[in-house]
Image: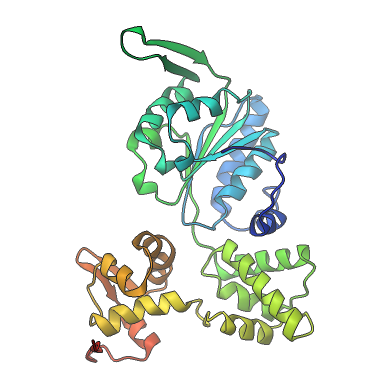
Amino acid sequence: MTDRFVTDSIQHPDKAFELTLRPQTFADYVGQRKVKERIGLAVEAAKRRKEPVGHILLSGPPGLGKTTLVHIIARAMGANITVSSGPAIERAGDLAGLLTKLEKGDVLFIDEIHRLPAAVEEYLYPAIEDFRLDIMIDQGPNSRSVRLNLPRFTLIGATTRSGLLTAPLRSRFEIADRLDYYGAEDLQHICKRSARILNVEVDEAGSIEIARRSRGTPRLCNNLLRRVRDYAQVRADGRITADIADKALAMLEIDEHGLDEMDKRILETIVHKHSGGPVGINTISVAVGEEPDTIEEVYEPFLIQEGYLQRTPQGRVATEMAYKKLGVKRNAKPQRELF
């Protein structure tokens, strides 16, 4: 359930790939300049006072570098880090096991912290506020409370759904920052840096082509770089140019605007089958064969940000850009399905 920092070997190839490319310092961390400046300042001040940095909450869409930033913070503080996630901490005993293993100055990182059970969350409040843990032993008339004093530690929570955090939990974080989608320029820097680490030759135009199709997400940028690298090694001379990147990404069905097959299926469902909307998320989910949560968290943010989709109280509505993308006039009649 937990991992001590830089002690466990990673066997999964995708995880090893991410760790290889993960920045180790604030200087190497590209993008999120304001967030990096604020957190870096807090870390430096805490180091000068020789005390742990205050509790930190990081929010934002998946793949933007929240976990990477957490490990940079721990490394900058010279602290050990214990990693877990909200769904993995099912009972108060699980939380107690994590907290009692911490030493002074350690970092406890809970990913997807909004998914902590309510009962566990109640136990967490005194732990992060007063650094104590009250544990109930036995049940009924023989039950009694045992108080454990905890060393001063830093809790860092990460969430992709900040709106699901309870107000009492959110208010207990001293620092709360949101990571936003990256611009093409920052993604190009990430692409070029990753290419150097992987010993892959990529020219300026090739890195731009990958960056602008990465949906503002560093994780996706690195994944696309790996797929384009494979294409270049098998069907070209191993060098990534704009033409090679374009052919590789076309093979992956990722167009020049970063839309993939599922994005297009969502837009086509709304435009062709529901006259452009409004249409409910559950209806879209059944039509495209994808879970509603996945559509809301993975696909919708990009489509909304790029102006292809609107979210209204009545449902999802396709915009004029979506019609242009699909080459359909807004007043066109929807296709009828034959049964």
Near-viewer residue (50 or 152): 152
The residue at the far top in this view is 142
84 lies left or right of 286 = right
Question: What residue is rendered at 62% in x and 29% in y?
Answer: 106
Measured from the top left, where is residue 322 in percent x and y?
35, 81
What residue is at 44 percent from the left and 63 percent from the top?
Answer: 298
Quarter of the image where one finds residue 248? bottom right
Report the colour scheme: rainbow
**Which residue occupies the foreground of this view, 260 or 34?**
260
Q: Quadrant of the C terminus?
A: bottom left
Residue 143 at x, y percent in the picture:
36, 11
Q: Can the viewer see residue 240 in this picture?
A: no
User: In the depicted view, which residue is nearer to us: 23 or 132?
Assistant: 132
What's the residue at 65%, 81% (across, down)? 245
Q: Nearer the viewer, residue 20 or 311?
A: 20
Residue lying furthest left: 314
